Amino acid sequence: MTSPDWFVRLVPALLLAVAFLAAPAHGHLPAAGSDATAAVRRSEQRYQIPAVKVLTADGRAQALRPLIDDGRPVVLTFLYTSCTTVCPVTSHVIDEFVRALGPEALQVNVVSVSIDPDHDTVARLAEHARSRGARGTFVTGDPQSSETVQRAFDAWRGDKMNHDAVIFLRAPASPVWVRLDGLVSPRRLLDEYRRLKPA
C-alpha cells in the first residue's frame, strides 16, 4: 500500500475510533441512524463454511465448520493483530456490542479469523484477546486455510493491507448471512443482531 492510500484509509478509521471510544458503554450506544453508520452497506448472502482446520487462541486444533455452527447466533470478523487501520475500530465495535449484551453475550458465538497466519501465532492471538479483555473465539491457521476462509466469505483482497471493514452475522442454522460492509457502529450491530431470524 502506498503512503497516500495508507493515509486515506487510516484517517476515517481513527476518527470513528475516537467517536466510539468517547461514547459511554454498557447499553448507552449511539443510535443506528447516526453519521457513523451512514456509509455501511448491508446485504444478505449465502456462504458455505469451508472444511478447513484452524487453531484457536488456546491452542486447540479444530474444524472451522463446527466451531462456527455451534447452535448459537454467529458474529464473524476477519482481523490481524498488527493492523493499525480498520481492525482496531472493528474490534472496538465487537467489544462494545458484547458489553451491551451483558449476560446474553454468552448466547452469541463471536469468531475472529486472522488474515495474517504467518505472524498471528496462537500465543499472539491469545495476548491480543487478553489485552482487549475480549470475549469470543480467535482463530489462526496456515496461509492456505486463511485464504480459503476469506474467499469463502468474499473477503479475500489479495493482501492483508487491502482488507476491508466487514462483519458477518447469522442466526442459528440459517443459510443466510447478513453482511455489513463499512465502519459499523456498536448500535447498528446490536440492532442487526436483534433482527436475526432462525431458519
Image (cartoon, helix red, strand yellow):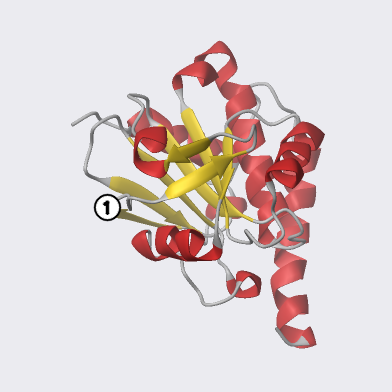
In the image: residue 122, left or right of residue 139: right
Is residue 32 at all visible to an observer of this figure? no
10 Å crowding of disc 1: few (<14), some (14-19), many (20+): few
Name the quadrant of the N terminus: bottom right
Q: Which of 25 and 81 is in front in this view?
A: 81
Q: Position of residue 135 (x, y in %)?
A: 63, 28
Q: Residue furthest left?
A: 199
In the rendered image, the vertical position of residue 180 relative to residue 11, given as above or below: above
Q: Where is residue 55 in the image (x, y as percent from the top left)?
A: 55, 43
Q: Nearer the viewer, residue 171 or 191?
A: 171
Identify which amino acid the numbered label 1 is placed on.
Gln
In the rendered image, the vertical position of residue 125 relative to residue 79, given as above or below: above
Label 1: state its secondary structure: loop
| Residue drawn at x 60%, y 74% as measured from the top left | 162
In the rendered image, the vertical position of residue 140 relative to residue 107, given as above or below: below
Residue with the mark numbered 1: 48
Q: Where is residue 99 in the image (x, y as percent from the top left)?
A: 64, 24
In the rendered image, the vertical position of residue 134 relative to residue 7, given as above or below: above
Q: Image quarter for residue 127?
A: top right
Q: Residue furthest top?
A: 103
Name the quadrant of the C terminus: top left
| Residue drawn at x 55%, y 59% as measured from the top left | 142
Is residue 159 at all visible to an observer of this figure? yes
In the image: residue 177, left or right of residue 20: left
Q: How many marks?
A: 1
Q: Position of residue 116 (x, y in %)?
A: 64, 61
| Residue drawn at x 77%, y 61% as measured from the top left | 84
